[in-house]
Image: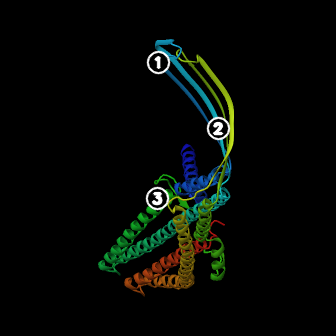
C-alpha cells in the first residue's frame, strides 16, 4: 500500500511538472511582450518621445531662475580726502550679499514654438511607429521560433515512428533467422538501418533542444528552462493579396515612419524660416542686495526692487546661416519624399515575394496531405506483405523511406505556410491584432 501511494505521488508530481512546462503560442507572445528586452527597450524609447511632447519643451513657458551671491574681502585701505583728512585701516573687512529671481518669457519667436510643438507631436508618432516596428518584428520572431519548436517536435515524433518501424523489422528478421527461414544478411541490414534511424533521431533531438533554447531567449527566460509547446499551429484563413496591400498602405509601420519623417522635414523648414521674423521677450526680476565695509564712504548699503521690461530683436545678418539652413531643409524634404517612395516600392515588392511563397506553400500543403495518405497506405501494405514473406526488406525500406519523407515534407510545408503568413501579417500591419 505504501509503494502504491509513493507511485501515485510520483505520478502526480510528474504530471504537475509537465503541465507547468506547457506553453501555448498566445502565452509565449504574452511573455515576449512582457519580458523580451528588445520590446522593453522599444517601449522606453516611446516613453521618452511621449515625455518630450510638452509645451515647455516647445518653448511656450517662461524661464525662471534664481541666483545668490556672497562675496567677502579683507583689504588694507589708505584714503585721502580733499578736505585734508585721511583714513588708513589695515585688514578692513567688506562683504556683499545679493539674491535675484529673474524671469524671461518669449511671447513671439516667429511662430517657431508652435511649429516645434507640432514637430514634437510628429516625433511622438514616430516613436510610437518605431516601437511598433520593433515590437512586431520581435513578435514575428517569437511566432516563427514557436513554429520551429513545434516543427522539430513533430519531426522528432516522425523519427520515433521510423525507429519503431525499423525495430519491428529487425525483430521479424531475427525471428526468421532463428526459425531458419531468413538470412544473417537480412538481420545485419535491418540492424544497420535501425542504427541509422536512431542516429537521425538523435540529430532531431538536438535540433529540438536548440529550438527550445532559442525560444526561451526570446521570452527572456533561462536557456535551459523546460518547455513543451501545446499548439499545433493551424494555418488559419487564407489571406488575399489585394486586402493585404490595402491594409499595408494604411498600417505598415515602416511606411508610417517614412511619412512621419517627411512631415518632420517640412516642419523643420518652417522652424528655420521663423528665424527671419522678430523675437519678443518679456523680462523681469526681483533683486535684493546688501553690502558693508569697514572702510569707505558707506558702512553699509542695502537695496531691493523689481526690474521689468521688454526686449525685441531681429536677426539682420548671421553669415548667410539662415539661407544655408533653408537650403538644407529643402534638401531633407526632397530626401524624405524619395525615402517614402522607396519604402512604398520595397513594401509592394516584399508583399509580392512573400505572398508568392505563401501561395506556393499552401499548394504544397494540400499536395503533401494527399501524398502522406498514399504513403501511409503503401507502408501498411508493404509491412503486411513483408510479414508473410511476399516483399523484400529493400522494398519495405523504400516504402518506409517514402512515408517518412512525405510526413517530413508535410510538416515543413505547414511550417512554411505559418512563417510566410506571419510575415504577410507583419507587412500589412495586422500582426498585433
Q: Nearer the viewer, residue 187 or 239?
A: 239
User: Marks 2 and 1, how far apart in space?
Assistant: 31 Å
Q: Which quadrant is home to the N terminus?
A: top right
Which sits earlier in the primary sequence, circle 2 or circle 1?
A: 1
The nearer-to-camera label among 1 and 3 is: 1
Q: Residue 64's x, y, as percent?
A: 65, 40
Among the two numbered marks 1 and 3 on one chain, the one whose residue lies closer to the N terminus: 1
| Whole-percent x, y for residue 21 in the image | 55, 55
- Residue at which label 2 appears: 102
Front residue of 171 and 28: 28
* Disc 2 from disc 3: Cα separation: 61 Å
The answer, for residue 1, to whether it is visible in the render is yes
Q: Answer above or below: position of 344 versus 230.
A: below
Q: Which quarter shows the C terminus?
A: bottom right
Kind of element beneath mark 2: strand
Secondary structure under tag 1 reads strand
Residue drawn 63% across and 51% down?
57
In the rendered structure, find residue 213 and report the number of the disc placed on it. Answer: 3
The answer to which quarter of the image holds residue 401 is bottom left
Judge whether 324 appears above or below 312 on screen.
below
Nearest-to-viewer mark from 2 and 3: 2
Count neighbours of disc 3 (C-alpha within 10 A) and say few if under 14, some if 14 to 19, many if 20 or more.
Answer: many
The residue indicated by pointer 1 is: 74
Residue 300 drawn at (x, y percent): 60, 18
* Cα distance in 3D space between marks 1 and 3: 75 Å
Nearer to the camera, 350 or 191: 350
Amino acid at each position: 500500500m505504501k509503494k502504491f501511494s509513493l507511485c501515485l505521488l510520483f505520478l502526480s508530481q510528474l504530471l504537475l511538472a509537465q503541465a507547468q512546462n506547457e506553453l501555448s503560442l498566445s502565452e509565449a507572445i504574452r511573455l515576449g511582450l512582457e519580458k523580451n528586452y528588445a520590446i522593453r527597450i522599444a517601449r522606453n524609447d516611446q516613453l521618452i518621445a511621449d515625455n518630450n511632447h510638452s509645451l515647455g519643451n516647445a518653448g511656450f513657458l517662461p524661464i525662471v531662475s534664481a541666483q545668490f551671491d556672497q562675496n567677502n574681502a579683507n583689504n588694507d585701505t589708505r584714503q585721502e580726502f580733499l578736505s585734508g583728512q585721511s583714513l588708513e585701516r589695515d585688514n578692513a573687512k567688506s562683504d556683499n550679499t545679493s539674491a535675484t529671481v529673474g524671469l524671461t518669457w518669449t511671447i513671439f519667436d516667429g511662430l517657431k514654438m508652435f511649429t516645434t510643438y507640432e514637430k514634437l507631436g510628429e516625433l511622438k508618432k514616430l516613436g510610437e511607429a518605431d516601437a511598433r516596428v520593433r515590437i512586431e518584428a520581435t513578435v514575428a520572431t517569437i511566432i516563427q521560433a514557436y513554429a520551429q519548436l513545434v516543427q522539430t517536435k513533430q519531426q522528432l515524433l516522425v523519427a520515433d515512428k521510423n525507429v519503431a518501424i525499423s525495430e519491428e523489422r529487425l525483430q521479424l528478421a531475427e525471428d526468421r533467422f532463428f526459425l531458419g527461414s531468413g538470412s544473417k544478411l537480412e538481420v545485419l541490414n535491418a540492424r544497420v538501418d535501425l542504427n541509422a534511424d536512431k542516429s537521425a533521431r538523435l540529430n532531431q533531438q538536438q535540433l529540438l533542444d536548440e529550438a527550445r533554447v532559442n525560444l526561451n531567449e526570446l521570452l527572456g527566460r533561462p536557456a535551459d528552462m523546460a518547455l513543451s509547446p501545446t499548439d499545433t499551429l493551424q494555418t488559419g484563413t487564407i489571406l488575399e493579396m489585394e486586402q493585404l496591400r490595402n491594409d499595408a498602405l494604411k498600417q505598415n509601420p515602416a511606411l508610417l515612419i517614412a511619412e512621419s519623417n517627411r512631415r518632420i522635414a517640412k516642419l523643420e523648414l518652417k522652424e528655420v524660416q521663423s528665424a527671419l521674423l522678430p523675437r519678443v521677450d518679456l523680462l523681469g526680476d526681483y533683486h535684493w542686495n546688501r553690502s558693508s565695509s569697514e572702510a569707505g564712504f558707506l558702512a553699509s548699503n542695502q537695496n531691493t526692487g523689481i526690474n521689468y521690461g521688454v526686449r525685441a530683436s531681429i536677426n539682420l545678418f548671421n553669415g548667410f546661416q539662415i539661407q544655408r539652413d533653408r537650403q538644407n531643409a529643402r534638401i531633407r524634404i526632397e530626401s524624405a519624399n524619395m525615402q517614402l517612395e522607396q519604402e512604398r516600392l520595397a513594401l509592394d515588392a516584399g508583399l509580392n515575394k512573400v505572398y508568392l511563397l505563401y501561395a506556393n506553400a499552401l499548394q504544397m500543403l494540400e499536395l503533401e496531405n494527399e501524398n502522406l495518405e498514399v504513403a501511409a497506405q503503401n507502408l501498411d501494405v508493404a509491412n503486411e506483405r513483408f510479414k508473410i514473406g511476399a516483399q523484400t526488406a529493400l522494398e519495405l525500406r523504400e516504402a518506409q523511406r517514402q512515408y517518412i519523407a512525405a510526413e517530413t515534407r508535410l510538416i515543413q510545408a505547414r511550417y512554411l505556410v505559418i512563417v510566410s503568413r506571419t510575415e504577410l501579417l507583419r507587412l500589412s500591419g495586422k500582426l498585433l491584432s
